[in-house]
Amino acid sequence: MRDVITTQQQKKFNVLLLGDSCTDQYIYGTCDRLNPEAPVPILKQSNEIVTKKGMAFNVKDNLKNLGVNVSIRTGNTTCIKTRFIDKRSGQQILRVDQDFVSKKLNTNKLELKEYNAVVISDYNKGFITKDVILSIIKISKGRPIFIDTKQKDLSCFNFPNVFIKINE
């Protein structure tokens, strides 16, 4: 006689992701010589250009790969980060940023009850401010909040349910 094993399906983890967004653009080519006007390589551009969403969208992809349900809200502007890559070495030889300031997130209409956690991906483009983060902490009702921010003073986020990622 065979034993029947029943397993309970695990409930999906729902995360609200708030953050800045950008378009990552990669322009490929080859570097065969140095510029005679300055000690920098000259990139002979090929037709290979790769474009994808970046910043908070990278976080979204990572969370989805972990099996998390992700709802994302980003600012009203999208920065563009263009990288020039030498195909032979794989080295980035230049990055050109076009930064724009976003309208600040309005937390008055932010509803968190359907989410298990909040992830904040702040690149300091105006969408997320210190006041916005503190407001989210206040309305979170103890939900875990994971913050990756370019803010300098992090002492004001010292709450038991707040986890801060620090880049050094």
Image (cartoon, rainbow, N blue to C red):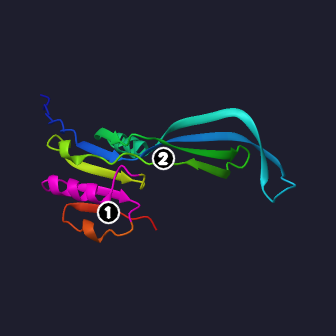
Residue at disc 2, secondary structure: loop
Q: Quadrant of residue 30?
A: top right
Q: Count neighbours of disc 1 (C-alpha within 10 A) and say few if under 14, some if 14 to 19, many if 20 or more.
A: some
Q: Count neighbours of disc 2 (C-alpha within 10 A) and say few if under 14, some if 14 to 19, many if 20 or more.
A: some
Q: Residue furthest right?
A: 36
Magenta range: 126-151
The x and y percentages for residue 37 are 85, 56
The x and y percentages for residue 107 are 22, 47
The x and y percentages for residue 155 are 29, 71
Question: Three-letter amino acid code at disc 2?
Answer: Phe
User: Circle 1 is placed at which residue position?
Assistant: 164
User: Circle 2 is placed at which residue position?
Assistant: 100
Tag 1 or tag 2, which sits nearer the N-term? 2
From the viewer's side, name the closer residue of 67 and 84.
84
Q: Quadrant of residue 29?
A: top right
Q: CA distance from mark 2 to mark 1?
A: 25 Å
Asked if residue 66 is positioned above or below residue 161 in the image, the reply reads above
Question: Three-letter amino acid code at disc 1?
Answer: Ile
The x and y percentages for residue 42 are 79, 48
From the viewer's side, name the closer residue of 152 and 131.
131
* Residue at the (35%, 70%) spot, across then down: 153
From the viewer's side, name the closer residue of 79 and 12.
79
